Amino acid sequence: MKKTTIRTGAALAAVLVAAPAFAQDLTFWSWRQEDRAAYEQFIDTFEAANPGITVKFETFEAANYNTILSTALAGGTGPDVMMVRAYGGLENVAVAGYLEELTNDSVPALAEFAAPALAAESVRADNKIYAVPFASQTQLVIYNAEIFAANGIEEPQSWDELVAASQTLKDAGVIPFANGTATAWQNETVTFGLGSSLMGKAFYDELMAGSTDFTDERFTGALSQVAEVAADYFPDGFIGLDYPSAQQLFASGMAGMFVGGSYEIANFKAQNPDIQLGLFAAPGETAEDEKLVGLYFDGGYAVNAASPNKEAAITFVNYLASAEFGQAFADTLSNISTIPGVTFNDPLLAEVNELNQSSIPYLMLAHFRYGEPSGSVLIQSEMQKLFAGETTPEAIGEALTTGLAAWYEPFKQ
Amino acid sequence: MTGRGLWITALIMPPLAFVALFIVYPIISAFAYAFFDWQGLRRGDFVGLENFHTVLFVEPYRSWTINAFKNNVIVFFALMVLQNGLGFILAYALWRELPGARFHRIAVFLPVVLSTIIVAYLFKLFYHPLFGVVNISLRGIGLDWLAQPWLGQSGTALWSIIIAQAWHMVGFPTLVFLAGMQRIPSEILDAVRMETESEWVKITKIVWPLVAPSATIVFTLLFVGAFNWFELPYIMGGLDGSPFGSTDVLGLYFYRTAFGNVSAGQQDFGLGSALAVLIFIFIALVAGVITTRLRAREIQL
């Protein structure tokens, strides 16, 4: 056992020492262990088109990826090309100066990308882009199409219709929503998956402009409506129901709807291949209100600023930003690629892409995870309190605003 | 130096180097980390006691620290009764050879052998609001109003996890107390039997004072365990001490601060190390006091 460890260590050290000798060998780090086969295929395509450059794909456990990556970069043993997170997670590595800035000159395709996608992979202070964004995720309502059809329910167009649909399901003995909130981060998903249209685009714009804060009635009103629906139409004891149980309730067909991310689709289909799924953006107060989903970006591909093979790495990143790659990415991995012009064969993905056209950013992740306490941590615990009847929406607005004022400049007064 | 001296030095040096490298060095470096500013994993400037000041006096860290510490204190006293108290009673019953003692000796100790992760998942299932055996049993005997989302309420979540911990570990103090009782000389017990019939007198005047060494061990270990508690709350309550910090303990809080969690995205080794140092000093001091005070009442036979 020990011998193998020593040998592996020696071999690794040898590889590290020898690495600069092979000028066109790139290492590419990722946290997507489950996508290894797909990435090997993408890399084969790239290598065929670019003789002389080889790419080695290495994966690490997702939960510890950030720690491993920052340690490696700090120690000077980082990869040439790597997946990085978005928003605050990106800033952690980018601000330390480990990543190469990407410009429209080095990666021309970036000029065509949507602004919010690029913003997710930029540092706020200087607006410089450090990674090619690869996928977006959408917070919306997923429903069981068979259950909806059997009960004569259409996709709701207003909040009242959503409540009426839930009541119909409840009367029919079906759990309307499968969600539980014992797992902290699910509270954030439920809040913005259901509440984005109620809050509205105007609230978002004013919040970003600094002319309003979380004590705004549009925000607190949305919270109280979400809490009412949860109290009436979530499973019995949902505040003690954890995330995996909630997923199973929906996947097994015991519940009609699930508030969650577009990443749940693949998971539900894997758990129950026969399930017929449908999607809608949770409606606003009236049918005329714009229906908004919560949109965010997962991460991006970045280049190590200290890489000895920077030119080859930029070539590879250009491929990762190409329409050809985007299409292969969407088809093989069933993810919403951020690359413009990609079409989706899977009808559900195509629908998610359609819904994305009318969205606001998934608020706390996109804008309030840059300091302690993060907006996510605050909204998660405050919503748990609200669901347990231990606080009010107005008090939450107050708690969020004063809590974030610790580091968020516009709230400091 | 004589050959014998050389020989001894040669034997002592490797283990000493091992201890220095793998025990002393990490502890000292953890102390050192606490005095620096950290940008992610990159060490910044020396900041003196700034990190300690932040975790103890600056919001939001201050209220997080107080909340986690308060929960640890609850856990300690609750387990003192549920784990050590019950352990003593069980040990006494086993020692008195009540019917079925041999079976129960194994049954009481069996959960200790189980992995903590198994116990945590098992109890998570027991407490499940819809399908959990606790709620189903309560509904089955007509006590519907008692069926609760046990792990979702601030009032019940921590206690639910404490009960799981007590079930898991009650066999350990039982075993230690039982061993202590079996070491009580039979002459003393015969003498007591001449004096009184009362079990109560026997327990309070003879057994309890004579198992004092066992009590010292289990009290000290429980104290250290309660303030380093991590696995059960991590699996059953989550890294955030869900719901809203009701199950947050110092171990979870330290982990979140030093290594970050997905929802916060911030990692700060300086604050984390400062917390670790404070926890270490607190545990070392109090455990030292408990041990010396309890040692003093032990009786040498």
Image: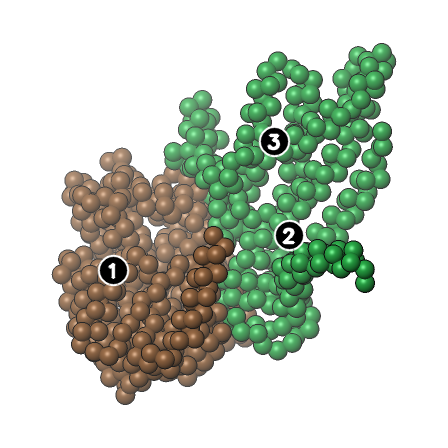
| Local SS, label 3 | helix
For the rendered model, the colour scheme is by chain
Residue B127 seen by the camera: no
Chain letter for mark 3: B
Chain letter for mark 1: A
Q: Which residue is mark 2?
A: B69
Residue B99 to residue A186: above or below = above
Q: Which residue is mark 1?
A: A37
Instruction: Residue A220: give x, y in percent of width and height.
Output: 42, 60
Residue A242 seen by the camera: yes
Instruction: Residue A262: give x, y in percent of width and height.
Output: 27, 57
- Label 2 Cα neighbours within 10 Å, binned few <14 / some 14-19 / many ≥20: some
Q: Is residue B106 left or right of residue A384?
A: right
Residue drawn where x is 64% and y is 62% of the image: B21
Between the residue at mark 2 and the residue at mark 1, the CA separation in whole angstroms equals 47 Å
Instruction: Residue A203: give x, y in percent of width and height.
Output: 36, 69
| Residue sitting farthest toward the bottom | A105
| Local SS, label 2 | helix
Residue B260 to residue A164: above or below = below
In terms of sequence position, does the residue under pointer 3 or pointer 2 come before the other?
2
Residue A245 has which mark? none
Amino acid of disc 1: Ala
Chain letter for mark 2: B
Picture quadrant where residue A232 is located: top left
Residue B178 to residue A294: above or below = above
Amino acid of disc 2: Phe
Chain coloured green: B
Out of A236 and B70, give the one closest to the viewer. Answer: B70
Chain coloured brown: A
Q: Which residue is mark 3?
A: B171
